[in-house]
Amino acid sequence: MKQELINLANNLKEQGLLKEPRDLAILHDSDLYCLYSSVDLDNLGLHDVQISPLADIGPAHGILDLFRQAMAARSNIRVVLLSRGPYSLAASSLGVNLPCLLDDGAQILGPVLRSTQVGRIKASLTGVSALLVHHTGGLCCAENIYDLEATASILEKCCRAVVDGWFLGPPSKISWFQRKIMHWKYRRFYSGKAIGQA
């Protein structure tokens, strides 16, 4: 599992999704395999992976607590990424829910980019795969590493659309109804879960 986490981090870096420090965790056999942003991304090794029990043995603060809250939200969440990219961090600092301005964001992330506080991760993850955690960044959750890579990329792109809109003027929004239909259609017909059932 340690090697799988290192491979995921290297894939994210090659795709340009790991330019900024990010925190990453994979759930395996009730243990969280975590890679923290303080490691050198150019020289990742198995010694950089920390293993922590998912069960709340004692007080967990910071990133580990976020991971535990996310994993406890839904049983199908197996991989979590805390994105601290420049756009997701800027959007999370607003502390408000933001509409998905892009169609792929509406399909995969849901109709709204929810903003939440650190202690309310579990309650806020209902029906969405990404959150904006106030002054922390974007929290992306998925069932597998492939969905996580797509979610992280699209979250950063949607946040960029919002931030660029501040400077270039507001873009025309997709209606709430259209965003809801896009998300439903993606979940029903195109997500990994639907493909696996076919």
Image (cartoon, rainbow, N blue to C red):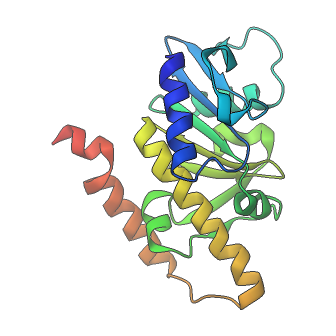
Image coords of residue 114 (percent x, y): 66, 58
Image coords of residue 163 (percent x, y): 73, 74
Residue at 72%, 63% (x, y): give it. 87
26 sits to left or right of 198: right
Residue 152 visible? The answer is: yes
Give the quadrant of residue 35.
top right
- Between 24 and 91, the one lying in front of the other is 24
49 sits to left or right of 118: left
Given the current orientation, which residue lies at the most extreme top position? 57
Residue at 70%, 79% (x, y): give it. 164
Q: How many marks?
A: 0
Question: Which quadrant is home to the C terminus?
Answer: top left
Residue 126 visible? The answer is: no
Given the current orientation, which residue lies at the most extreme left position? 198
- Between 55 and 7, the one lying in front of the other is 7
Image coords of residue 84 (percent x, y): 73, 49
Position of 171 relative to 85 (above/below): below
Residue at 54%, 44% (x, y): give it. 12
Given the current orientation, which residue lies at the most extreme front position? 43
Image coords of residue 146 (percent x, y): 41, 42
Give the quadrant of residue 145.
top left
Position of 103 relative to 113 (above/below): below
Residue at 57%, 89% (x, y): give it. 172
- Between 137 and 74, the one lying in front of the other is 137
